[in-house]
Amino acid sequence: MKLGELVTQFLEHAEVGKNQSPKTVENYRHYLKRFTDWFGEKKSPKDITLETVQKFRLFLNRLEDEKGGQLLSIKTQNYHVIALRAFLKYLIKNDVPTLSPEKIDLSKIPERTVEYLSREELERLFEAVRAGSGSKLAQADVRSARDCAILETLYSTGLRVSELVSLNRAQVDLQRKEFMVRGKGRKPRIVFLSERAAASIQAYLKMRDDNFDPLFLNYRRARGGDDITLGEKRRLSTVMVEYLVRNYARRAGIIKKVTPHVLRHSFATELLVNGADIRSVQEMLGHSSITTTQIYTHLTNKRLREVHEKFHK
């Protein structure tokens, strides 16, 4: 069987057999298409060798991305290799002769650092959203109430922006201040709301007179007036949430680039700084591997600070 046909089988297996998320399957399709376009979809998997992989990686290293004309990052190049290894593993499991995926190593990438907001910056951000309409929240329009609920929820739960916009009203328990979400790989986890976040969501929901499922709705002002109507797509998009966070950060006078993911980083950093153990933070973030969570430890290691203060005179 030719390589292109086997890739199709692998993608179907990822979707149905392994029940992987649509985004994962889409990424596999994109990265493997790049490989088969380069290598030849009519070739046999027996033709894939370590030399083949090395030449493909050289091709990726010299390839410009499709958006800004920049060279592909090492991280993006590794994503291609990860997809290829998953495909080869599938072939080996199904007794199709090909290169063993264990022989392929990933490129070493620089240690990842994270951007997060200090407590003072967070309070400035929340103050900016509360003042978004020029009045107190109780008198604010429904969009300002929604925006306040969004930022409080992002910081209180550490949700990814995609998880936030997919929330429905029925799944959020404001009495228990907790709910379940499915993150990457459809992995379920429980997240918790602070008192402030729960109160913000409650205040927003009290201002709504609809029965739509999405927790956060897409509003727009009518032309030539102050009336607020629902957009054609009632569920708020990830792009709009990213815009809201960026806009309020600018109003708060925060110079650094602020995104929903920065609020997720701030959530994790605050927990660790205040003594939470890294395994608990891993569960709350929905990380499948502890190594992903360990990117925060160099920012928050109290023991090292205590050693420095004790012995550095």
Image (cartoon, rainbow, N blue to C red):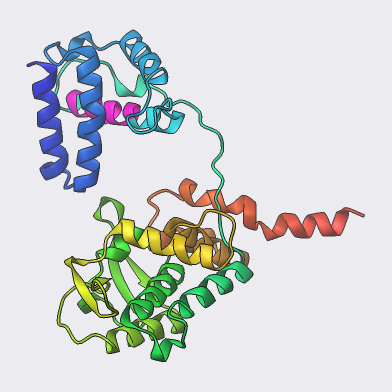
Q: Is residue 97 left or right of residue 82?
A: left
Percent position of residue 126, x then y: 51, 74
Residue 219 in sight here: yes
Note whether 33 is above or below 47 in the view shown.
below
Magenta residues: mostly which secondary structure? Answer: helix
Residue at the (33%, 77%) spot, across then down: 143
Note whether 144 is above or below 33 in the view shown.
below
Residue at the (38%, 23%) spot, across then down: 64
Percent position of residue 263, x then y: 48, 62
Name the residue at the right extreme: 313
Percent position of residue 90, x then y: 19, 29
Magenta residues, start to end: 80-91
Image quadrant holding the C terminus, namely bottom right
> Nearest the camera: 60 or 103?
60
Image quadrant holding the N terminus, namely top left
> Nearest the camera: 134 or 40?
134
**Quarter occupied by residue 8:** top left
Percent position of residue 260, x then y: 42, 59
Q: Is residue 151 magenta?
A: no
> Nearest the camera: 43 or 280?
43
